[in-house]
Image (cartoon, helix red, strand yellow):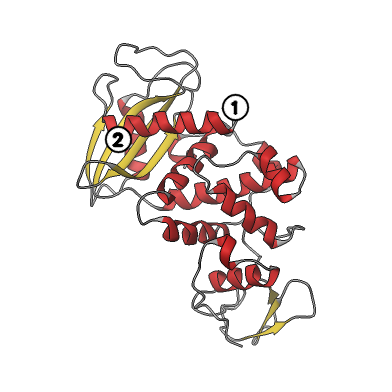
Amino acid sequence: MEVNAGTELQPFSSRYNSEQACMEALIAMKWRSGFVCPRCAHTRCSRLTSRHIPLFECGKCKYQTSALVGTIFERTHLPLLKWFKALELFLLPDGISAIRLSKVIGVTYKTAWLMLHKIRHAALEFDARELLCGDVKVNSDLYGCNPSRFQFSQPYASAVVAGCTVTESGEPEQVKIRMVPHKRGDGKRANRLELAAFINGHVDVRTSAVESFPLAYRLYAPLRKVVREAWESLKSTYIALGLKHLQAYLNEYTVRRRLHLPGAEDTMRQKLLHMCVAIPAIPYRRLIARQPNQPLAAAA
């Protein structure tokens, strides 16, 4: 049996209006070039429809798998329609809180919280694979303050390193914002070594012209504006946002920001779904045990 991988992805709300449509979209995304057995790499299979979730049996080794294995949807007890609705709401200009999502799609707060964090984790892991390249600017900045060149000390603000690719007009395009370990909530900025760690971990230095700005009074202004906008957006949506999961929320913001760049909406919708299919779900115990002070390069 051949798996149809030619489905064109359209906005979730208009195309994925049934459980079957959602499942077929995941199948098409999982095996874009046709089925490949995860055990023996054979490319022929039989589709078994005797269960609620379609299974695919390898024509060679008889191993059975589904399109949900290895995705954030694996072992879910929720209808895919609820997941796809959550993905749509995740991409709202200012995101959506777990409290609001729980009411909109009819799940408990804990379930909504876990769904959103699984989506954030997928976005975080996928984003780490995409290096900044081209004309790149890197700032040593503070998250959680209203920046002013006359205020160099901001108690409770957290150090971040922000990097971006720059368009021909000088505007930030792809943006990454990474928190700096051991400088959370103390108002201290990243130093040159921490900027260098960010560049080594998140910039393709072979193909990029990189300019870094370590000093508070000489930052790349358009990128500083993005960090400020991230703070304003997140605090307007999430009332009590702690430091433990702040990196996940910052990455959510940069993903949503790319979606709303001119001409990027359809591409980012496809990319978000691809993230959720390509990245396995983070276990709940690992999620709640996430260490806030992991190394900068590993915080991607």
Q: Is residue 214 left or right of residue 123?
A: left
Instruction: Identify the residue under disc 2.
Output: 138
Please tell me whether residue 155 is drawn above or below residue 198 in the rendered image. above
| Residue at 57 percent of width and 48 percent of height | 90
Q: For this rendering, which residue is in front, 266 or 174?
A: 266
CA distance for labels 2 and 1: 25 Å
Instruction: Identify the residue under disc 1.
Output: 242
| Residue at 37 percent of width and 24 percent of height | 190
Mark 1: few, some, or many residues within 10 Å (few <14, many ≥20)?
Answer: few
Please tell me whether residue 260 is drawn above or below residue 182 in the rendered image. below
Residue 282, position as x, y percentages in the image: 64, 49
Callout 1: SS: loop
Q: For this rendering, which residue is in front, 33 or 254?
A: 254
Q: Is residue 70 left or right of residue 131?
A: right
Q: Is residue 166 left or right of residue 197?
A: left
Q: Residue furthest front?
A: 14
| Residue at 68 percent of width and 48 percent of height | 283
Query: Mark 2 or mark 1: which comes first in sequence?
Result: 2
- Specify the amino acid type for callout 1: Gly
Q: How many marks?
A: 2
Callout 2: SS: strand
Residue 142, position as x, y percentages in the image: 40, 24
Please tell me whether residue 98 is drawn above or below residue 75 in the rendered image. above
- Specify the amino acid type for callout 2: Val
| Residue at 27 percent of width and 41 percent of height | 171
Residue 274, position as x, y percentages in the image: 51, 61
Asked if one can make out residue 252 in the rendered structure from this viewpoint, the answer is yes
Asked if one can make out residue 293 in the rendered structure from this viewpoint, the answer is no
Residue 147, position as x, y percentages in the image: 36, 20
- Quarter of the N terminus within the rendering: bottom right
